[in-house]
Image: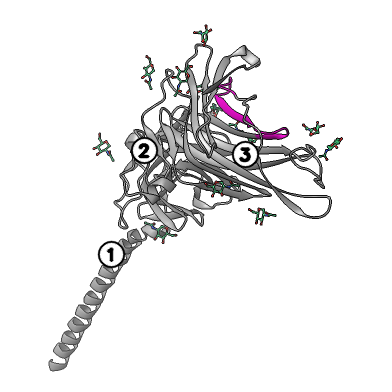
Amino acid sequence: MVCFRLSWVPGSVLFSLCLILGAVPSYALEVNLTDSENATCLYAKWQMNFTVTYETTNKEYKNVTIFEHGSPTYAGSVCKDDHNRSVIEVQFVPGFSWTVNFTKDSSNYLIDGILISYNTTENSTFPNAKDKGVQTVYYPVGYTVPLNNIFRCSSLLPVDEKNVVHNYWDVHVQAFVENGTVSTKEFVCAEDKASTTVAPIVPTTATPAPTTPTPKKPEVGHYVVTNGNGTCLLATMGLQLNITQDKVVSIININPNTTDFSGSCQPQSALLRLNSSSIQYLDFVFALKNDNRFYLKEVNASMNLANGSVFSTANNNLSYWDAPIGSSYMCNKEQTVQVSETFHINTFSLRVQPFNVAGGKYSTAQECSLDDDTILIPIIVGAGLSGLIIVIVIAYLIGRRKSYAGYQTL
Ligand SMILES: *[C@@H]1O[C@H](CO)[C@@H](O)[C@H](O)[C@H]1NC(C)=O
Ligand SMILES: *[C@@H]1O[C@H](CO)[C@@H](O)[C@H](O)[C@H]1NC(C)=O
Ligand SMILES: *[C@@H]1O[C@H](CO)[C@@H](O)[C@H](O)[C@H]1NC(C)=O
Ligand SMILES: *[C@@H]1O[C@H](CO)[C@@H](O)[C@H](O)[C@H]1NC(C)=O
Ligand SMILES: *[C@@H]1O[C@H](CO)[C@@H](O)[C@H](O)[C@H]1NC(C)=O
Ligand SMILES: *[C@@H]1O[C@H](CO)[C@@H](O)[C@H](O)[C@H]1NC(C)=O
Ligand SMILES: *[C@@H]1O[C@H](CO)[C@@H](O)[C@H](O)[C@H]1NC(C)=O
Ligand SMILES: *[C@@H]1O[C@H](CO)[C@@H](O)[C@H](O)[C@H]1NC(C)=O
Ligand SMILES: *[C@@H]1O[C@H](CO)[C@@H](O)[C@H](O)[C@H]1NC(C)=O
Ligand SMILES: *[C@@H]1O[C@H](CO)[C@@H](O)[C@H](O)[C@H]1NC(C)=O
Ligand SMILES: *[C@@H]1O[C@H](CO)[C@@H](O)[C@H](O)[C@H]1NC(C)=O
Ligand SMILES: *[C@@H]1O[C@H](CO)[C@@H](O)[C@H](O)[C@H]1NC(C)=O
């Protein structure tokens, strides 16, 4: 085992790095970043390899397998900076670096992206390169992992883009390690779950599970946004998310008991944001139309699916839930907001008022056309009334005929 001790300049947090050079094939890397207290804050062990294709001066394409050259160094790795970011940076040969960065919020950390940078001017690694200079390839990883869980992925994750083929396998990584102890709770990648029948280790932070084809109705939640003047936005609704990813449909009911909400109210727009352990955000943005109506203009969402992947979508060109300002919009029947081809929201028992809430209460409701059975009532009443009128008219006519008959006999 080889250990590196490096210092990170800003804040001068010391950390050490250890690299275990395994047996052939010697692609296994292990990194143990420690903070100033010598406590582990990032641990990773993984295998990877790369092939870079570049054009030579005599118009040929050449492949370089980076790992066959040089041994790794880790300058530039960051245990944790002031902005909750961590970085692992690895250099193998002059002019080639591989970087992965992490960020965290209160409940999850994100394996954000992999940046590969290589300098084709380095003629020891890239002899006779036609285009000389620094090339970069960025691959957005986008894995969200609950804090205090170690991400594990044994499957081969191949990435093939822009002249660089990179492969990863046997990955174990935990960023933002708590109390210096690498967790025993595993967050297993979707690829491993698909390729094994072994029950996956369920992360403690609940992720929405894809449910049966006939899902239950979601529970109705009551959401309130306040500002300096008291309640400024009201929403009551049951929400069911319909996500299609890789042809697989996931139906996720929002559980109001475990969902937090926040928001803001501006004169021209209003925001309701829901979030939970698995939903980073689900934003409903309302706007005004012709200064006298409001509508749902925008939905932005980002969430972790049960398979470990992150689903994000946005649409700022919607037109739903349209009603006059000073009233509320209501729809008791199931209604669907189509945010994108892959993301629909089914709403149940919906009532919203994003503007001009007075006294914390809903104003009169404008109902959606789907609730039209309320129109049936007047029809039934109307039909009943006209039936009654017909009966009266007939009775009157019969009565008159009888009296005519009476006169005739007289
Ligand atoms: C990481 O390094 C720290 C300090 O050197 C050590 O206590 C810890 O056991 C190491 N962890 C792993 C998983 O190697
Ligand atoms: C961290 O470990 C090094 C040796 O590995 C030691 O010199 C140093 O004093 C330790 N620092 C703390 C804060 O324990
Ligand atoms: C990289 O690793 C993968 C998976 O083990 C393997 O299929 C591939 O041939 C390797 N590539 C190189 C250039 O060694
Ligand atoms: C270089 O790698 C690419 C992609 O892996 C492959 O298609 C191509 O045949 C290789 N070229 C040479 C000269 O080996
Ligand atoms: C870093 O994350 C913690 C929660 O884990 C949070 O309290 C803190 O505000 C974050 N810091 C920054 C700069 O985002
Ligand atoms: C990770 O690196 C990419 C590319 O340099 C950058 O766009 C992104 O903001 C970084 N993420 C974090 C969390 O620092
Ligand atoms: C690229 O490599 C050349 C040759 O070693 C060097 O002169 C140049 O500074 C490098 N460029 C960068 C941006 O590191
Ligand atoms: C690499 O470039 C240097 C000058 O930049 C030159 O002296 C050297 O011969 C080159 N080496 C090869 C292998 O092309
Ligand atoms: C870390 O330590 C704090 C305080 O002792 C404790 O509350 C917390 O649960 C610990 N976290 C883990 C993951 O052990
Ligand atoms: C409160 O209401 C007053 C008058 O309607 C308005 O001028 C002010 O901007 C409102 N304050 C907030 C925080 O919305
Ligand atoms: C979910 O969306 C898919 C694809 O648009 C659709 O076929 C399916 O009926 C929807 N399911 C529900 C419960 O909304
Ligand atoms: C939410 O909480 C209420 C009251 O505590 C309970 O009746 C209901 O079953 C809970 N719903 C879910 C989905 O957990």
Residue range in magenta is 78-97
Location of residue 347 in the rendering, given as x and y in whole percent from the top left corner: 39, 50
Location of residue 180 in the rendering, given as x and y in whole percent from the top left corner: 44, 18
Disc 2 residue: CB within 8 Å of ligand 12 = no
Q: Earlier in the sequence, mark 3 or mark 1?
A: 3
Please identify, in this view, whether the residue under mark 2 or under mark 1 is nearer the observer: 2
| Residue 200 visible in the displayed image | yes
Q: Earlier in the sequence, mark 2 or mark 1?
A: 2
Q: Quadrant of the C terminus?
A: bottom left
Labels 3 and 1 touching (C-beta < 8 A)? no
Q: Which residue is located at x 41 percent, y 27 percent?
A: 148
Q: Please tell me whether residue 181 belongs to the stretch shown in magenta.
A: no
Q: Which residue is located at x 63 percent, y 17 percent?
A: 8
**Which residue lies under the disc numbered 1?**
381
Q: Which residue is located at x 36 percent, y 29 percent?
A: 184
Location of residue 374 in the rendering, given as x and y in whole percent from the top left corner: 33, 58
For residue 222, the mark is: 2
The Cα atoms of the two marked residues, 2 and 3, are separated by 56 Å
**Which residue lies under the disc numbered 3?**
67
Disc 1 residue: CB within 8 Å of ligand 11 = no
Q: Which residue is located at x 43 percent, y 21 percent?
A: 178
The kind of secondary structure element at disc 1 is helix
The three-letter code of the residue at mark 1 reads Val
Disc 3 residue: CB within 8 Å of ligand 3 = yes
The Cα atoms of the two marked residues, 3 and 1, are separated by 82 Å
The kind of secondary structure element at disc 2 is strand
